[in-house]
Image (tube, rainbow, N blue to C red):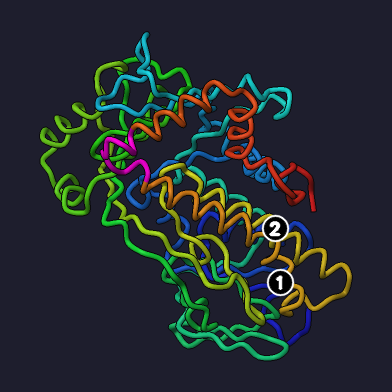
Amino acid sequence: MSETFDADVIIAGAGIAGATLALALAKSGLKPVLIDPVVFSAQTAPTFDGRASAIAYAAFRQWRALDVAPALEPHVQRIAQILVTDGRAPGAAADAPPPFFLRFDAEEIADRSEGEPLGYMLENRHIRAGLAQAIGAAGIEVLAPARVASAEFGPRAAAVTLADGRTLRAPLVVGAEGRGSVIRREAAIGALGWDYGQTGVVATVKLARGHGGVAHEFFLPGGPFAILPLTDDRASLVWTESTRRGEALKTARPEVFHAHLQRRFGDFLGEATVEGQVFTYPLSLQLAERLVAPRVALLGDAAHGVHPIAGQGLNLGLKGAAALAQTIVEACRLGEDFGSEAVLERYAAWRRFDTVTLSAGMDAFVRLFSNDHPLLRLARGAGMAAVNRIGPARRFFMQEAGGAVGDLPRLLKGEAL
């Protein structure tokens, strides 16, 4: 690294994808610097992010390779089955499922996934805490609270100016600071997308009966409703409401919220008692027009923000972190300028097709399942029933959701860089 540089890679955004990238680079001998407006201790507070994420088994292999898994495993809930139901009321787990349903079972692909589950449910605060611990142990410099105010991109270096006036220089800057990315704006990379007019309502509940490691996704007339298993017979509930109804739920009295929840939830797992606060998140699609520019790469929600209907948003970011880390490290070992557009285009080419197709698929999924049109309901029900009867199709979808399809970066195979 030249003495005129403050780091090899400046990463704006110390969220889950940005922190994972920093760890991968540091373990390969590079010097990353993380910048974030929020300190790690605040990011791990229960009030900061109430979401839980379904982590694809390939993405979890990356954390094993980076030695983060030991801090996460006490908080992991393995997903043994996923049950998807299209109906007018909850009840997919009943003894007699409705005609249109999908059942995915980890045992079906155990021979291909080395016994991995369909995924791992983890509360985001525990993921952030595990990454923060690993970042500290690796000695990675974290500037927080600090905010990127502007950036300039020259032929051989990028300069990032912080709100407090400090300026940092590096061969490469990564924008990983979310949908409102300053780095993306400063690099003149446009974004396209649209608002769904929907809100994701998120709450953690304690269940009266054990969930058995089964994740449920109900497609109801009012929108998708997911019951995602957590440790200690808890579940993360995620359901879609109109923006107006979502805001009303967030501010509703506890007894009103509980009554609404229980109507949606049904009684197959007994009473569901809310633990902690209720969170709401606006739902939209946003895709950056490009993933890279000279001295710039985009990662995570700065590159692609998708609907959470299939839980793939964070996994997209983790795939991107693995691909970008490998691209940078391999170029560095070959003596190449890893911040050049020629090198960064390899990362973009690696991730472009998967990102666009998955984002388009999620958008189509939202439009198909977020309505109660009789003909669409019939078509999607017939499709679900067909996939449920075709073993190879079912197994392909499970492997795809596990992140194990396609040209995988080494970290997603569990291999060190």
Q: Position of residue 250 (x, y in %)?
A: 19, 47
- Per the image, label 2 sits on a secondary structure element best described as helix
Label at residue 18? none
Q: In this view of the protein, can residue 136 be seen by the observer?
A: no
For image coordinates 37% across by 15% down, the residue present is 97
Query: Magenta region: which residues?
Result: 368-377
For image coordinates 58% across by 35% down, the residue present is 397
Measure the alpha-carbon separation of dots 1 and 2: 12 Å
- Is residue 56 rendered magenta in the image? no
Q: From the viewer's perspective, is the residue at label 1 or at label 2 nearer?
A: 1
Q: What's under tag 1, amino acid-wise?
A: Glu
| Residue identifier under label 1 | 345
Residue 215 shown left or right of residue 370 in the figure? right
For image coordinates 46% across by 49% down, the residue present is 362
Residue 98 in the image: above or below residue 156: above
Q: Residues within 10 Å of mark 2 (few under 14, many from 20)?
A: many
Q: Position of residue 233 (x, y in %)?
A: 39, 22
| Residue identifier under label 2 | 323
